[in-house]
Image: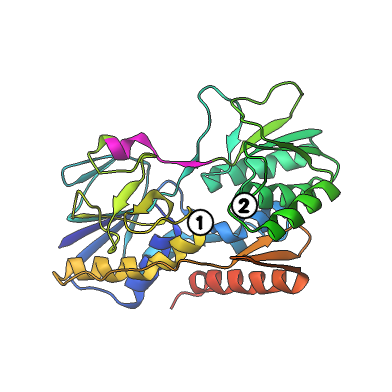
Amino acid sequence: MKKLVLVGGGHSHAIALRQFGLNPIVGVQITLISEAEDTPYSGMLPGHVAGFYSYQECHINLRSLCEFASARLIVDRAVGLERNQVMCQHHRIEFDWVSIDIGSTPNIPSGAQGIGAKPISKFLKWWDEFAQKNPKQLAIVGGGTGGVELVLNMQHRLPNTTIHLFQRDREIMPKHNAWVRRQLKQLLIQRGIQLHLGAVVEAVEGFDADAIVWVTQASAPDWLRQSGLKVDEQGFILVNDALQSVSHPQVFAAGDIATMIHYERPKAGVFAVRQGKPLFQNLSAALNHQPLRAYHPQSNYLSLIGTGDRSAIASYGKFGVRSRLLWRMKDAIDQTFMNQFHNLG
């Protein structure tokens, strides 16, 4: 039996597992290593924070998905690679081919207090408990797309809480066009969010915050570099157009944890979703000793930003518009994505 090990239950691996269920390969043992039996869908995270979606609606049941794909699920945390083994806290798993899709975590200054918005599962467990305590003040560090969308949805759930948003740049969401930035800044002010722009935050001090949430630049775990994989400056695995490690051909990577050497793209869920099918195709090709195919990510993509009031802003290049219809469109897209995992077959 050839051994394929998938490390992490990210979007790309969820899609690949479903494809293996639909297109099984004889003579291959598939193992998924995940820290939890459920994996959250990032597209629905803000809506769940606001209270629009239940836990079940925005999570993929990995145990059911593995059963569909005839794969075994090992609930454990990967901590390294050694020759042809994935080293976990409680297991050593042998592989012929391995794929890594463990997402990323915010870069939190050493010694700083608070919780990161990722891993999402850990954050959501904390949030559901925190939101019930009627907190007085909450601080969010990071004014990119993720931070702004998160704070608007938090404000919907906690209308009586004073929320502070800290952003190191003079503008929020610097990667979006001026119209989108202006609209969202006005919306934040209208909602009573306290903006602190041009603030490089090493720690949040000076006021009594009940909690601090970090939605800062993505970072990768140290064990990837320590395992000998070639990584970029932030520690993300460098992969070629086939999503294959440039240093270890038996290793593939996708989602936030991977950096394509020929394409500079943001760490966004839309790319992880799009990589799922190409990853499956190339893992299948590798297992069958066939040539790998190049994957070319789109250069532009539509960003639908939920504003916490069942409305959304669309951002695409220089284009931007706000509408409740856009929220319904985003909801339909997200529900369609999740239905393929809720209704396997």
Residue type at mark 2: give it: Thr
Quadrant position of residue 59: bottom right
Residue type at mark 1: give it: Ala
Q: Residue at x 67, y 46 (%)?
A: 172
Residue 33 versus residue 228: which sits nearer the camera? 228
- Secondary element under disc 1, as helix, strand or loop, is loop
Quadrant position of residue 202: top right
Residue 345 versus residue 236: which sits nearer the camera? 236
95 w.r.t. 283: above or below: above
Residue 275 among those drawn in magenta: no
Quadrant position of residue 264: bottom left
210 w.r.t. 247: above or below: above
Residue 103 makes an appearance in the image: yes
> Dot 2: few (<14), some (14–19), or many (≥20) neighbours within 10 Å?
some
- Which residues, given as a range, are shown in magenta? 217-225
Q: Residue at x 27, y 61 (%)?
A: 30
The numbered dot on residue 268 is: 1
Q: Measuring from the top left, give residue 42's x and y in whole percent.
A: 56, 57
- Secondary element under disc 2, as helix, strand or loop, is helix
Q: Residue at x 19, y 50 (%)?
A: 248
**Residue underneath mark 2:** 145
Q: Measuring from the top left, give residue 327's x and y in whole percent.
A: 71, 69
Q: Measuring from the top left, give residue 320's x and y in whole percent.
A: 68, 66
Number of callouts: 2
> Dot 1: few (<14), some (14–19), or many (≥20) neighbours within 10 Å?
some
